Amino acid sequence: MNTKENSVDMLHGPLSKKIILFAMPIALSSILQQLFNAADTSVVGKFCDSNAIAAVGTNGEIVALLVTIALGLASGANVLIATFIGRGEKKKIADAVHTSILMAVILGIVLAIAGQFLAKPLLIAIKTPDNVLYQAILYLKIYCAGLPFLLLYDFASCIMRSKGDSRRPFIALVLSGILNIFLNLFFVLVCRMDVAGVSLATIISTLFSAILLLVWLSREQDEFSFSIKKLCLNKRYCSAILKVGIPTGIQGAVFCVVNLFIQGAVNSFGSVVTAGNTIAMNYEYFAYYMITAFAQAATTFTSQNFGAYNMDRCKKVLRLCLLWGFIFSNLIIVPITIFRDQVSMLFTSEAEVIQVASLRCMIIVSLTSICTFFEVPAGSLRGSGHQIVPTILTIFGTCVLRIIWIFTIFQKYRSLEVLFVSFPLTQSFIALSFLAAFLAIKPFVK
């Protein structure tokens, strides 16, 4: 696979086809990452018991938080390198690539160590049922040990995507996803490792995907070529990556942080409700990742064109990403909503668990496409150098409003329906806030 075959010219020619071809592998890659967790849930659900499902499921939002932070940090490398491409500053790309890879390893190790100490307090804080607490802690500690591999994959994939190559990161995840399923079955059925086995399978498969991307980068024949000997930490590039990556990571993380409060409220209803909630969350993330893929497309296409001072093209990128993000997310949302009972049965045969999963699908999953109208504008703002505004709006719309809802409305009218309805309400508020912010900032005015 040579560089030209795997690159997309974002600066010239029609945009619609290029955006779709760029975004779809990203969406499928994110969905595959979620399928790692879904496979964990399915295997323990079919071959263990509901306690094992709950142990894996209660970690769902924590795992999503870690994945979101990793991808957010990596997006800084995407924006930095894509901007260099747009400006034609090719000589700076090699140092940016090697700085990004070394940063991934360092950040991954820091997060892995922190995870070992924070696993138990986090799970206790979200009121994990006592009968599944030990298994849940074990799963999370093992998962956190693999965070350096997750960061390495995300940074390497963002490096490739900065030049329009979203195909090879997807291929790497397809192969590692297949490996993950086989390892799940091996560790659970042969080694009898249940929860520990499925988390270990995820680590090994993630390591495989990271190594595969590094091998491909090492075979590049241009400034993207990777070599261990060239690893470095350029302070200016580190600062630029973190300037974008930290706010982006925070923006995505606040969804997960507040969802930990939601998870705590869900857990208070018992392990059966926790299991049903877990199943529906998998499908919710499938739709959400389709939206964030077009948000990442908006970031990358905007970064290159903004760097080239092509503002009219930036505006067109925003419009097209909004359109296609909404359409493609609903291709997932509509059938899941209609066949919510049937898709829930893929994970369990327990009627009470299916009922809870179906309820979340009906209230939350059915309206997830609302997220298109703030995720895509946020991607465009990041690509044009505005990182703080999306973070502030997201924190207020999700963190503040949902927590207020939990401690006021939910406490007074305590039910799953009242808890779940906070999602579409706050998402609508954030979408309107982003519209107002975009009109006020006018990022693409020359």
Image: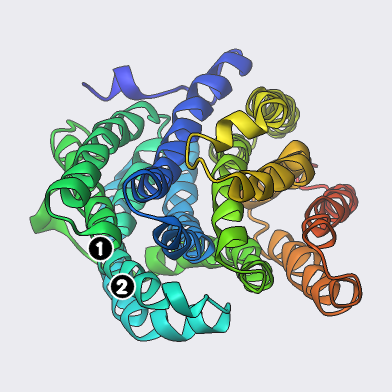
Report the residue that reaches farthest toward the left: 229
* Residue 188 marker: none
At numbered mark 2, what does the secondary structure look like: helix, strand or loop? helix
Above-or-below relation of 25 to 106: above
Identity, as a three-letter code, of the amino acid under mark 2: Leu
Q: Quadrant of the N terminus?
A: top left
For the residue pair 325 and 22, the one nearer the viewer reads as 325
For the residue pair 265 and 5, the one nearer the viewer reads as 265
For the residue pair 277 and 150, the one nearer the viewer reads as 277
Q: Measuring from the top left, give residue 257's x and y in whole percent.
A: 61, 70
Q: Is residue 179 visible?
A: yes
Above-or-below relation of 384 to 314: below
At numbered mark 1, what does the secondary structure look like: helix, strand or loop? helix
Q: Quadrant of the C terminus?
A: top right
Q: Is residue 308 visible?
A: no
Identity, as a three-letter code, of the amino acid under mark 1: Ala
Residue under the image location 25 percent in, 69 percent down: 145
Q: Which residue is mark 1?
A: 196
Q: CA distance from mark 2 to mark 1?
A: 6 Å
How many numbered discs, if any?
2
Say which label, 2 or 1, has the lower sequence index: 2
Q: Measuring from the top left, give residue 87's x and y in whole percent.
A: 49, 40
Q: Measuring from the top left, give residue 202's x and y in whole percent.
A: 28, 52
Residue under the image location 54 percent in, 56 percent down: 275
Task: Report if the CB atoms under discs 2 and 1 are less than 8 Å apart.
Answer: yes
Q: Which residue is mark 2?
A: 138
Above-or-below relation of 52 to 276: below
Q: Measuring from the top left, give residue 111's x and y in whole percent.
A: 35, 74
Residue under the image location 54 percent in, 46 percent down: 350
